[in-house]
Image (cartoon, rainbow, N blue to C red):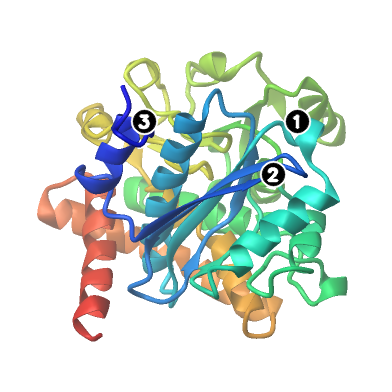
Amino acid sequence: MTDVNGAPADVLHTLFHSDQGGHEQVVLCQDRASGLKAVIALHSTALGPALGGTRFYPYANEAEAVADALNLARGMSYKNAMAGLDHGGGKAVIIGDPEQIKSEELLLAYGRFVASLGGRYVTACDVGTYVADMDVVARECRWTTGRSPEHGGAGDSSVLTSFGVYQGMRAAAQHLWGDPTLRDRTVGIAGVGKVGHHLVEHLLAEGAHVVVTDVRKDVVRGITERHPSVVAVADTDALIRVENLDIYAPCALGGALNDDTVPVLTAKVVCGAANNQLAHPGVEKDLADRGILYAPDYVVNAGGVIQVADELHGFDFDRCKAKAAKIYDTTLAIFARAKEDGIPPAAAADRTAEQRMAEARTRR
């Protein structure tokens, strides 16, 4: 079904009428010469310019790409608010297989589209884009972060993303078991790419037992060859059923927590780097009903956005790491509010973020 202009009606309903909408601006971008098709979604600029990464992914269709951009942008508003940043939420998606169509010409064209927004949106890396890509985009757009140190940037933001998730795990351990240490805890990581492989390092350094899976078997093999103590399982379905699993860390794409996975999940804690882990509203209650403590994804995975935001002011790694370390305190505060209000942690995080955004709007 389409509207009078031919756009997918379900996407327009999401944008203008649903609780998942409320976005300020959505820009559809096309450059036929390079093959660029992109969507830039700005959810909120209440706290400042929208900040969020660029995802390069082979979506099944354009409607799926628009829907993903809307969801991701909304999530960035909440993430940036909870991270204490003076930024709103935005996200961009480039449609297509980056292995097939990514080119310098395409990235430059994309940079020109971002620049045309005049600073309302600041971009960075996400799935399918890397530091080298941001260096190219920055040639056309000064509102680009996640660049290489050689080009005045902060480099790979996955370093502090993984550190923040690790702090979230420590907070969950403190809340649930009364001790933040992860020594001898068994942690299952689904996705050991840009963020997941750093998380493995943090956990092993503290003496945790680590189980991993990834659709890319060569990546898993690289992890187990470097760290023989790490156990690999066939897939996520096997991982979530691992006996005596303490913590499950979804670190790949979204929707990991759904009606199929939650009932069979053996872990007592979910804390991972993936965005939009809850497949639909109500999953957080299903987790709570099973006694599983959920660390809201956008709270614990904010280390990366803390890093790229700092790049706009002259990057200082130690300053960023100190701020990312506070994810431990923020996560504990969310658990405390959830307990006090009698709601799941995801709802408590939403309330806290919405409160900060609302207060910013009243000051305008």
Quick one: label 1 or label 3, which is nearer the N terminus? 3
Identify the residue at image location x=17%, y=52%.
339
Mark pair 2, 3: CA separation: 47 Å
Figure quadrant of the C terminus: bottom left
Quick one: label 1 or label 2, which is nearer the N terminus? 2
Q: Is residue 103 left or right of residue 17?
A: right
Identify the residue at image location x=37%, y=67%.
81
Within 10 Å of disc 3 (Cα), the crowding (few <14, some 14-19, many 20+) is: some
Mark 2 = which residue? 204
Q: Is residue 81 left or right of residue 166?
A: left
- Mark 1 touches mark 2? (CB < 8 Å): yes
**Residue 333: x, y in percent?**
30, 63
The mark found on residue 229 in the picture is 1
Residue with the most extreme front position: 4
Q: Quadrant of residue 112?
A: bottom right
Q: Amino acid at mark 3?
A: Pro
Measured along the vertical axis of the image, is residue 356 above or below residue 161? below
**Residue 197: x, y in percent?**
71, 42
Nearest the eye: 351 or 23: 23
Nearest the eye: 105 or 358: 105
Q: Quadrant of residue 36?
A: top right
The mark found on residue 8 in the picture is 3
The mark found on residue 184 in the picture is none
Report whether residue 143 is seen.
Answer: yes
Q: Nearer the viewer, mark 1 or mark 3?
A: 3
Q: Is residue 215 left or right of residue 355?
A: right
Mark pair 1, 3: CA separation: 49 Å
Mark pair 1, 2: CA separation: 9 Å
Question: In what element is the residue under mark 2?
Answer: helix
